[in-house]
Amino acid sequence: MLGTLIKRKEESKPSSSTGLWKLAMRRLKADRIAMISLFVVLCYFVVLVLSMTGLVASNWNKEVAESYAPPTFMGAPQEAAKKVETTAAQALPENPVDPLKDVIAELNAEIAAGKGESSAIDYYGVVDPLAEDMKAIDQQLGGHLLDQQSELKQTLPFGADKWGQDVLQKTIKGAETSIIVGVVAALLAVVIGTILGAISGYFGGWVDDILNWFYNIFTSIPYLLLVLAIAAVLQQKGIMSIVLILGLTGWTGVYRLIRAEYMKHTSREYVLAAKAIGVSHFRRIFVHIFPNVSHIALVQISILVVAFIKSEVILSFLGFGVPVGVVSWGSMLNEAQSELILGKWWQLIAASVAMAILVTAFSMFTDALRDALDPKIK
Amino acid sequence: MLAYIIRRIWQMIPTMLGVVLLIFFLFNWVGGDPAYILAGKMSNPEQIENIRQQLGVDQPYYVQLWIFIKQILTFDYGLSWSTGESVSDIILTRLGPSLTILIPLTILQTIISIGLALAVASVRGSLTDRMIMMLCTIGMSISILVYIIVFQYVFAYQLSWFPVQGWSDNFGENLFKYALLPILIMLVVSIAPTLRLYRSFVLDEVNQDYVRTARAKGVGESRILGVHVLRNASIPIITDVMSSLPALLIGAFLIERFFGIPGIGREVIIAVERSDFPVIKAITVYVAAATMIFNLLADLIYKIVDPRVQLK
């Protein structure tokens, strides 16, 4: 009995909007890849909420480890390696134009004679001239200063960057920035696109002409160029600015799709019936027609989140995105670019893998969602 | 045909005017007073007043707009704010390097993507097909920045197969030495999305009646895909190639920046970094015009590919 009821309901699906949603939910649940992707995306959002409330990654900008501390599985840098660096430093070539060449020669001689304070010879092979002062200050402070330095960890789960910041915490904090920018900008773009598309498709005539003119203007300038042009003009940097840039430029695709749907629906019987009983334009647009096209808006949000996360990373990489003091996957990649030459690959891997997993899961979920919500596929 | 082209160009005018207004609104209104950017931090009121007069920004907005329109019509955008070079010269000299990358890239990308799309479509629905599509999704999820950083590090820095960066005055040396790795990276980045798109174009055609008819006549499967289906799928492919060309000019900015190629894209980045408004304005106007012209060209090519298309 129940089975036949469900079946009968299914047959009449495309005509009722709740049916479409229920059917889509059922299709999504049956799709294993979609459910795994959704789970991954939800995990990111859980981390996002935890990071926003300060439960995790609150120390991302603190110096918690030594500069470039490697990931834990690689182990702490060997003492031998440090010695090699010191010997390499001894063999500093004599540069005839170097104004410090006499000093370096003297230092090298001192090192060779074993007189120098070997512990104070740092990476560059130069004696730390402040070592004595630091010791004195440290004694006055009751040993706190050097204690703090010795507390720095040798390794971290995902390694550390140049300033000894935890790459794992930075990646989480970067996820927070990138996801918030992506989601808010996508919502903004879809709201703008939907409202303009609805008005344009519903009213037609000169309203449609004007909005189409806007659409043509925005699409004849390549997206990235428009984004960069607005980034050039907006003087203050901030998360709000990127959201505005992406949202104000990304609405065109939504507009085109929603407009086409509204053109179709405006002449349908249910809208004409609503008109006959005196329903206002506003109610017809947003209460009567919108539920029937909302699945398109939903899929567009999903598509745009992915696109905007990618754009934000590029903008922040170039320095047109998040301001200094805010970490994003883009700014991490920017640091990682110069670190890679030094052989410090962990920040690059952390940021790019974190982003690739999120974007892959999100895109696969979007594909599944689009298929599930497509009324043509039964 | 000629009447059609003239009408289309006539229809471009309002859009172009809109683009001009949008750029004007952005740079002359939202962008604030350019005199402060130009004068820099150490400025006094007289200097600023002087610069304002030179630029004409002390004039009312309609006069400024007229100055801008005159600049567009005479192809003379004045001097760059940061280098003092003529903006037109900057654009002309940057176009060559950009095209040296873009033309081989577009040709290779189109040929490889069409070939792969037909191959994948011939095994549609199979495990291979699904695996390739999944690989494409994963490949598209990795930031283009990561591809560039890793490829440049591995192939140029570590293995020294290619120069790390650089550009010369010799076209042949540029194309066969400096442009190789950039083109390779752009190919890797662009093939995944293009393959997905072209595969869907091909799949839209394979269930059509004419395919069934051809099969019933005994036409071989490879001929059906390579001749019958490809001709019909080529219309959306042409649209895609033509409409993405002007955007590629800017889209190659990351590769140009990493490899030190003095192209249009890198020029945009430099101009944005230095708030060099005349350069950005000029490039935006030209690229928007190019986009419209390429859309028109795409429509004209349809007519050649598909005689059924009526140009209205």
Image: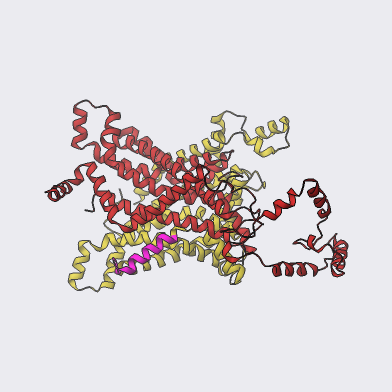
Percent position of residue B189, x then y: 47, 61
Relative to B263, is A258 on the left or the right? Answer: left
Q: Which residues are magenta?
A: B122-139
Please tell me which residue is depicted at 24% across the width and 42% down the height of the picture: A18
The colour one sees for chain B in the rendered image is yellow
Is B131 included in the stretch rendered in magenta?
A: yes
Residue B304 visible within the image: no
Q: Main secondary structure of the magenta part?
A: helix
Percent position of residue B157, x then y: 61, 67
Please tell me which residue is depicted at 66% across the width and 55% down the height of the picture: A152
- The answer to whether residue A17 is above or below residue A128 is above
Relative to B6, is A326 on the left or the right? Answer: right
Percent position of residue A329, x then y: 53, 52
The colour one sees for chain A in the rendered image is red
Please tell me which residue is depicted at 77% across the width and 67% down the height of the picture: A89
Q: Which image quadrant is residue B276 in?
A: top right
- The answer to whether residue A127 is above or below residue A137 is below
